Image: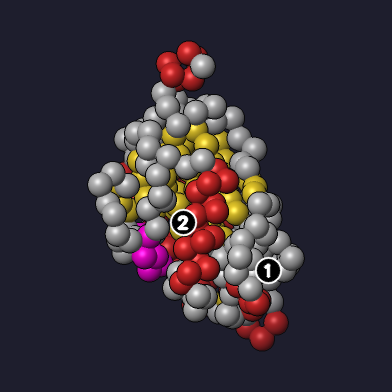
Amino acid sequence: MDLIRPDWPAPPWVHACCTTRGGGVSTGVYGSLNLGDHVGDAPGRVARNRALLRAALALPAEPLWLNQVHGCAVVQTGGLVTGPAADAAIACRPGSVCAVLTADCLPLLICDRDGQHMAAVHAGWRGLAAGVIEATLSALDAPCGDLLVWLGPAIGPAAFAVGSEVRAAFLGADPGVASAFQAGPDGKWFADLFALARHRLARAGVTQVYGGTDCTYSDPERFFSYRRDGITGRMASLIWISGSSDESERK
């Protein structure tokens, strides 16, 4: 299974990764590790892919698979057994797995330096504009200056063409993000999701931000991309805590 591990100074008991296309049983446009159960793939194959992922990562529980709606709702993972309508999940104890599904939108994984709080965030342009990052930071019971954030694979700034209304939505709220948009043909603009996320994180006081280099659109061998393919699968970005610092020191 081809997995991407964040290169960040998280405590050793905090585990995080992002899947790619490789390592599953789905075929055709969903080949092969499609983890989305809402994209038209055979349910049995999606279930098998999720089981393979759980085994490969030795996950302590089934991830809380969200019903993502491009909004800014945040949920706690504890006790939830069905997919709530939300675009971010947080947890503060071992045994819970936060996860988001993406295929061009930006996944963010968050933990604090003490490894006691974590979150997974799904941020397309609508979620970013609506404040999903800020809502998640507010829900986490940790100072923003203590947080580590990893930006996973998303559509890159050379491929993400948007209309002027998208640019206006961001600049209307904060003119300081003008540099995240470059003029394109036919009145379009190329938007940099990574830069938009970094700007909002910095504005909130988050200084330790990592990742933000992989473009889903430009690498069809490794990543699903909705903008490129239309009908396609979904990758997962996951984060979980295996134990406390005391437990880690006893091992």
193, above or below 152, in the image: below
User: Residue 241: horizontal and vertical position, in percent?
Assistant: 44, 34
Q: Is residue 69 magenta?
A: yes
What residue is disc 2 on? 100
| Classed neighbour count for the residue bearing mark 2: other residues with Cα under 10 Å, few (<14), some (14–19), many (≥20) | many
The span picked out in magenta is 66-72
Q: Find numbered disc 2 in the image and state the secondary structure of the residue it sits on.
A: strand
As drawn, which residue projects farthest toward the bottom?
Answer: 186
As drawn, which residue projects farthest toward the left?
Answer: 79
**Residue type at mark 1?**
Tyr
User: Residue 70: horizontal and vertical position, in percent?
Assistant: 41, 67
Report the predominant secondary structure element of the magenta stretch. loop
237, above or below 125, in the image: above
Residue at (41, 23) in percent of width and height: 244
207, above or below 84, in the image: above
Q: Which mark is residue 217?
A: 1
